[in-house]
Image: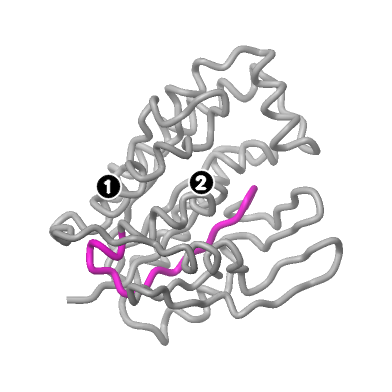
Amino acid sequence: MSARVAILGASNIALAMPQLCAALSQSGVQRVDLVCGHGRSYGLRSSIPLRSLPAILQAPLWGELPAQPMLAAALLTDVGNDLVYGVPNSTILAWVEEAATRLEVCGARIVLGGVPLASLRQLTRRRFELVRRVLFPFHPLRFEQAQAQIEDLQHALLALAQRRSWQVLEPRAQWYGLDPIHVRRRCRPEFAAMVAQQLLPMREAGTQPVEVTPVDLVRLRLLRPREERLAGCTRHGSGQIRLSGGLEVVCH
């Protein structure tokens, strides 16, 4: 029996896309709708050098959901990105809850990705400044402020998930290295397998592993969202491919 899932996030989803597609295909998923991208925010238009993306809540996904088959499940993750943009926790929670509610209306069972708190707690001030300047050079955030807000955000997310009966995907400390927020390359298959299992816990993975071919890998890396702004120019892409194993990948 085929299934359709949605995944909302930022750079961790973009970087692990091949591993996620392999794991979801093995679980029998026929279509995955992705809303992701480096630095992507849930409620703000986000910008990194030379590239700008609309907020997750403003993605084309929302206008297309009613015309598509019902969703089996959805993952909302990379929530902590909005801390860097100076967004208060109350606003972040409201954005996450709004996105989840829209997905639930379409039948989705919600899985919420937690903040990588164990990794972030190990940050020294010097390492924090290095990471901030490399990943978010135009968004100043004080070390003490970040520490307190991250702790509060994780507690609030867990409380929200409990109140709404959502599953929680807890990041594992060993997934992270010097970069405290991005899953290491060698840990991405484990991350992807956990995502697939959390999204579709009643399904057994196929006996044969599903490989993403080199051609599929190139196509995934070239896959662009429906709308992005590059060097000040708006670009519209098809945002949709079908991999050799049959999985339809739609990037919003």
**Near-viewer residue (174 or 207):** 207
Label 1 with label 2: CB-CB less than 8 Å = no
Q: Residue at x 76, y 57 (%)?
A: 51
Span of residues in magenta: 24-40
User: Is 29 one of the magenta-colored residues?
Assistant: yes
Q: Quadrant of the C terminus?
A: bottom right
Q: Spot the residue most to the bottom.
A: 67
Q: Residue 174 location, x and y as percent?
A: 38, 26
Q: Residue 29 location, x and y as percent?
A: 28, 69
Q: Residue 98 location, x and y as percent?
A: 47, 59
Residue at label 2?
12
Q: Is residue 80 above or below residue 102?
A: above
Q: Spot the residue most to the right.
A: 232
Of the numbered discs 1 and 2, the one sitting upstream in the chain is 2
Q: Residue at x 36, y 30 (%)?
A: 172
Q: Find residue 134 and report its image quarter.
A: top right
Q: Is residue 154 above or below residue 70?
A: above
Q: Quadrant of the N terminus?
A: bottom left
Residue type at mark 2: give it: Asn
Residue type at mark 1: give it: Gln
Q: Residue at x 34, y 36 (%)?
A: 170
What label does residue 167 carry, if any? 1
Q: Residues within 10 Å of mark 2 (few under 14, many from 20)?
A: many
C-alpha gap between disc 1 and disc 2: 19 Å
